[in-house]
Amino acid sequence: MTKKSRKGLRTFQFVIQGYGGNAYYPERIAALERALARRPRRFQLDLIGRGDMAADWALLMRSVLLQRSPRTRLITNARSSLQGGSVLLWLLGDQRIIRADARIFFRRVDMTETGEPDESEVWKESDLKYIDSFSEIDPDDSDYIKVLRLIDEFLPVNEFAGKVINMPVLRQFGLVENEKLDQFLATAFAAAPESKGIDGREPNQKRLWSKSKAPQTE
């Protein structure tokens, strides 16, 4: 579902369906590409559902979101608690919103082994190994490690993997707006009222300037 408000905000709902979303995700991601191709000024991605999104789908969606127009401001809105790959999608927002009682979580895995060849080494035919279902390296885990490394750009994965992260922690890392702090700063840096004359009226020069600079009605 995609909606566009009068203020130029386009909203796009994406339901996190976990590993059972193979029928839903391709169609919805294609719709996401079409919506972003319109280059909206503000685009809000509403994430709903507590499923553990497969890492490959999260990486694909990330690539789509990164290809958006530079003029499009991305707002990610977590309307549910998030797990795994969906956490990465939420972190990609220029502005992030999360339900007050929602949480985020990503499981811990061994990030030292990815099963990928070292790019600095020359490939040899004798090094080719067949990876099957009985291999130690799971391709899904390899993708998930990529997700965790990207999440690590926002949150220290080693400290938070396997732990439930709530709103105070997200605010501490500056990942969500602190409304109280914003209000305090707005008050502290608000323009001071213009000084008035001795008789309590504004000087004549300022009155003339105000009239000449009055904004025109569109």
Image (spheres, rainbow, N blue to C red):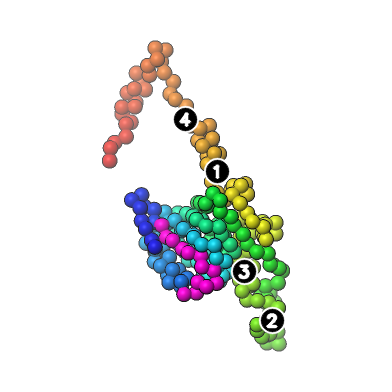
Q: Name the one closer to the observer, 203 or 62.
A: 62
Q: Earlier in the sequence, mark 2 or mark 3?
A: 2
Task: Pick out the residue farthest to the bottom.
Answer: 126
**Residue underneath mark 1:** 178
Say which element carries label 1.
loop
**Residue underneath mark 2:** 135
Q: Which mark is residue 144?
A: 3
Disc 2: CA contacts within 10 A as few (<14), some (14-19) or many (>=20): few
Say whether residue 120 is visible. no
Q: Amino acid at mark 2?
A: Ser
214 up-or-down from 8: above or below: above
Disc 1: CA contacts within 10 A as few (<14), some (14-19) or many (>=20): some
Q: Which mark is residue 205?
A: none
Disc 3: CA contacts within 10 A as few (<14), some (14-19) or many (>=20): many
Task: Look at the image and say whether residue 12 sits in the magenta stretch.
Answer: yes
198 up-or-down from 163: above or below: above
Instruction: Identify the residue at horizontal 53%, vertical 32% (top origin).
Output: 188
Q: CA distance from mark 4 to mark 1?
A: 22 Å
Q: Which residues are magenta?
A: 11-23
**Residue underneath mark 4:** 191
Say which element carries label 2.
loop
Q: Where is residue 107 drawn, in percent x and y?
A: 65, 64
Q: Amino acid at mark 3?
A: Tyr
Say which element carries label 3.
helix
Q: Is residue 3 left or right of residue 77?
A: left
Q: Amino acid at mark 4?
A: Ala
Q: CA distance from mark 2 to mark 4?
A: 65 Å
